[in-house]
């Protein structure tokens, strides 16, 4: 049996960035670093920023309205990065996803809304923006705690200026078979930090240190949090991306939201000098996020067990080992 359990549920209720340094903040940060020290690299964040009625509006109306649009309309959602725009139309697989860029900003959600509904859809826009803004606050708290624990919080303002947020809405259709099926194969995210919002139908599984797949339970007020490859590279491997997958079995359509921070296209991800020393030699060379994502989805990148290391890993002789 896996030694990884669900007691790593961190309570962010009542917390905000303005409370950094308070006893409540320090308590949650200590719990977070216990998770990281154990190499689990994921936890559930209990968070009251997204009101229950807002969450219900997102899944009960807004997402269903979006996925009911004609395929040619949804395909307007394009991106210069693979899998960052519309995903779907796979033979034999009822899976679709659309991404809202700059989801924390009114301009970002308005641009996406007008792309889907040129005549406008204020209710959709307001709901998605409200969710994106609140989740961005949780992401910023998580990331600040991580940087504080690494002793590099002085880099937070610059990192904030170099990141943006994407909100991806996903739909997993019902299956003819009742047997559980892997819909999204095992992978790590290219993000800095990923938050997942599940609703009514479970499916997210994380790979434990023991090599077992652990199903993340449903919760009306918590959000699985996982470290992505961009933060793994930036932290010089002090933090590591979490491998996960999505498993669904017939009966009900599954909706979920994936909210992630990631470097802007023109940003070079570079390890702070404080995170390189004799005990922690440089692991990753500076890399551009856009070029890294393109590599990850190339034939060479997809064949690699570790696309980050394959793309920008320091060779043994270069590290002086």
Image (cartoon, rainbow, N blue to C red):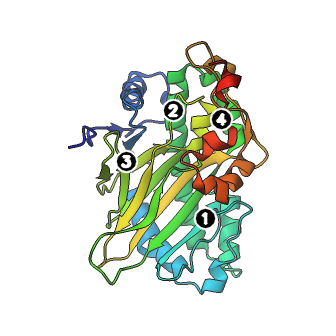
- Closest to the camera, between mark 2 and mark 3, is 3
Is 229 located above or below residue 22 in the figure? below
Q: Residue at x 33, y 45 (%)?
A: 211
User: Which residue has dot 2 on it?
Assistant: 239
Q: How many marks?
A: 4
Q: Earlier in the sequence, mark 2 or mark 4?
A: 2
Query: Crowdedness of circle 2 by 10 Å Cα count: few (<14), some, many (20+)?
Result: many
Residue 22 lies, in percent from the top left, at 44, 22
Q: CA distance from mark 1 to mark 3?
A: 25 Å
Q: CA distance from mark 1 to mark 4?
A: 29 Å
Quarter occupied by the C terminus: top right
- Closest to the camera, between mark 1 and mark 3, is 3
Q: CA distance from mark 2 to mark 3?
A: 16 Å
Residue 207 numbered mark, or none = 3
The secondary element bearing badge 4 is classed as loop
Query: Crowdedness of circle 1 by 10 Å Cα count: few (<14), some, many (20+)?
Result: many
Q: Is residue 76 left or right of residue 11?
A: right
The secondary element bearing badge 3 is classed as strand
Residue 306 lies, in percent from the top left, at 56, 45
Outermost residue to the right: 266
Query: Crowdedness of circle 3 by 10 Å Cα count: few (<14), some, many (20+)?
Result: some
Q: Are marks 1 and 2 in contact (CB under 8 Å)?
A: no
């Amino acid at each position: 049996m896996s030694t990884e359990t669900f007691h790593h549920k961190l309570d962010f209720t009542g917390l905000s960035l303005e409370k950094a340094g308070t006893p409540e903040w320090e308590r949650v940060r200590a719990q977070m670093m216990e998770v990281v020290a154990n190499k689990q690299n994921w936890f559930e964040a209990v968070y009251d920023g997204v009101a229950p009625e807002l969450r219900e509006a997102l899944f009960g109306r807004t997402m269903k309205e979006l996925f009911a649009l004609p395929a040619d309309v949804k395909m307007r959602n394009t991106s210069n990065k693979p899998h960052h725009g519309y995903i779907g139309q796979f033979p034999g697989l009822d899976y679709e996803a659309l991404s809202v860029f700059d989801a924390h900003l009114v301009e970002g959600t308005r641009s996406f809304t007008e792309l889907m509904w040129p005549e406008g859809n204020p209710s959709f826009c307001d709901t998605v923006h409200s969710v994106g803004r609140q989740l961005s606050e949780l992401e910023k708290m998580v990331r600040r705690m991580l940087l504080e624990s690494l002793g590099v919080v002085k880099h937070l303002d610059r990192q904030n200026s170099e990141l943006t947020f994407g909100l991806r809405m996903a739909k997993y259709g019902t299956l003819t078979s009742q047997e559980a099926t892997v819909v999204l194969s095992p992978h790590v995210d290219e993000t800095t930090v990923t938050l997942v919002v599940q609703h009514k139908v479970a499916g997210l599984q994380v790979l434990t240190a023991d090599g077992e797949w652990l199903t993340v339970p449903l919760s009306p007020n918590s959000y699985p949090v996982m470290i992505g490859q961009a933060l793994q590279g930036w932290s010089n491997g002090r933090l590591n991306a979490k491998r996960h997958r999505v498993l669904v079995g017939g009966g009900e359509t599954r909706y979920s939201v994936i909210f992630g921070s990631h470097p802007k296209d023109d940003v070079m991800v570079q390890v702070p000098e404080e995170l390189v020393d004799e005990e922690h030699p440089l692991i990753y060379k500076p890399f551009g996020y856009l070029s890294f994502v393109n590599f990850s989805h190339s034939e060479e990148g997809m064949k690699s067990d570790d696309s980050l290391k394959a793309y920008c890993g320091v060779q043994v002789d270069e590290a002086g080992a």
